[in-house]
Amino acid sequence: MAEVKKENWFKRTWGKVCKFFRELRSELKKVVWPTPKQVMKNTAIVAVCVLVVGVFIWVFDFVARIGIDALITGVHSLIH
């Protein structure tokens, strides 16, 4: 009986790599890429959201700092 020889590891791996890139290329053809106008609009939305969240964090930090300073001052005045 003839033995079935297994394919070389490098050949198997190279075949898998080639298959991956063929499938990748096939999938990338299906992608609907945004227009430059859509990219600019989405970028502006992200920038506005980042600014709003940044301002919210800044206000929260400012109020928390005032509250903690008041608490420390109150406790300090009770001790002395």
Image: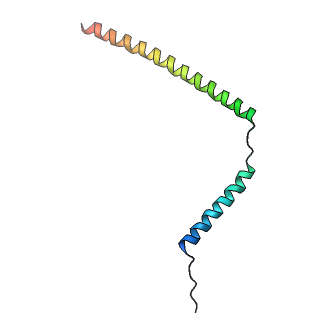
Query: Is 38 located above or below residue 56 in the figure?
Result: below
Pick the front one: 52 or 80: 52
Query: Is 3 located above or below residue 79 in the figure?
Result: below
Quarter occupied by the C terminus? top left
User: Quarter-wise, where is residue 43 in the image?
Assistant: top right
Going by the image, does 5 lie left or right of 43? left
Name the residue: 75% across, 51% down: 30
Going by the image, does 13 lie left or right of 22? left
Q: Residue furthest left?
A: 80
Name the residue: 63% across, 29% down: 46
Q: Where's residue 22, x and y in %?
A: 68, 60
Q: How many marks?
A: 0
Pick the front one: 76 or 25: 25
Quarter occupied by the N terminus? bottom right
Going by the image, does 1 lie left or right of 67? right
Judging from the image, the colouring scheme is: rainbow
User: Quarter-wise, where is residue 36 in the image?
Assistant: top right
Q: Residue furthest bottom?
A: 1
Q: Where's residue 25, x and y in %?
A: 70, 55
Q: Where's residue 9, x and y in %?
A: 54, 72
Name the residue: 61% across, 65% down: 16
Q: Where's residue 64, x and y in %?
A: 44, 17
Pick the front one: 74 or 15: 15
User: Quarter-wise, where is residue 77 in the image?
Assistant: top left
Query: Is 79 located above or below residue 54 in the figure?
Result: above
